[in-house]
Image (cartoon, helix red, strand yellow):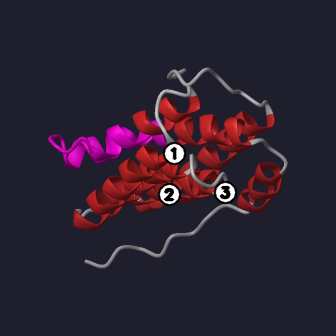
Amino acid sequence: MAKPAFKDAPLRREIEGLAKQQDHHTLACWAAECAERVLHVFEAQQSEDLRALDAIAAGRGWIRGEIAMVDARKAAFAAHAAARESDNPAASAASRAAGHVAATAHVKEHAVHAATYAVKAIFYDCPIEDQERRVLEERTWQYQNLLGGNTDNGERTR
């Protein structure tokens, strides 16, 4: 069965505009929070594959100054490879969200992609009748979290 076409919430544009106003550290922290919210989707399908988890950890390590950007990029590439290898669209999107967390160390605009892939993971992981509501709920959380500037020291806050 073909996967349904992803339909994003209109709030996406506001998030993109707000993200342009944020510093690199804030966006990296926010991207990690977005991806962590859907990591379980990947882990449920690929329980032995740690590449998505490692990419988020690499992004957080970069935030704390513990790893170099080039090492974070390697973790990003690995998470994207895991996404390509998955035949589950929700798990693939969750791994791509994680990959973009690590890629944010290189270019801050990757944070917006982490958020979008997190929303896609939710979209593909829930029943069709809940997709629109769940996407709007997640985009609302993303916007409010970014608007509040909830940055941390690179540790999980959920």
Label 2 SS: helix
Q: Nearer the viewer, residue 76 or 88?
A: 76
**Prevalent SS, magenta region:** helix
- Which of label 2 and label 3 is nearer to you? 3
Q: Residues within 10 Å of mark 2 (few under 14, many from 20)?
A: many
Q: Amino acid at mark 2?
A: Tyr
Q: Is residue 118 visible?
A: yes
Marks 1 and 3, how far apart at CA: 14 Å
Q: Is residue 87 visible?
A: no
Q: Amino acid at mark 3?
A: Glu
- Which of label 1 and label 2 is nearer to you? 1
Q: Which residues are magenta?
A: 35-56
What residue is shown with label 2? Answer: 117
Q: Amino acid at mark 1?
A: Met
Q: Residues within 10 Å of mark 1 (few under 14, many from 20)?
A: many
Whether residue 37 sits left or right of residue 44 in the image: it is right
Q: Residues within 10 Å of mark 3 (few under 14, many from 20)?
A: some
**Sequence order check: which comes first, mark 1 or mark 3?**
1
Marks 1 and 2, how far apart at CA: 21 Å
> Magenta segment: does it hold 36?
yes
What residue is shown with label 3? Answer: 109
Quarter of the picture containing the N terminus is bottom left
> Magenta segment: does it hold 91?
no
The x, y position of residue 62, in whole percent, is 52, 35
Marks 2 and 3, how far apart at CA: 13 Å
**Sequence order check: which comes first, mark 1 or mark 2?**
1
- Please name the residue shown 41% across and 45% down the image: 71
The x, y position of residue 52, in whole percent, is 34, 45
What residue is shown with label 1? Answer: 69
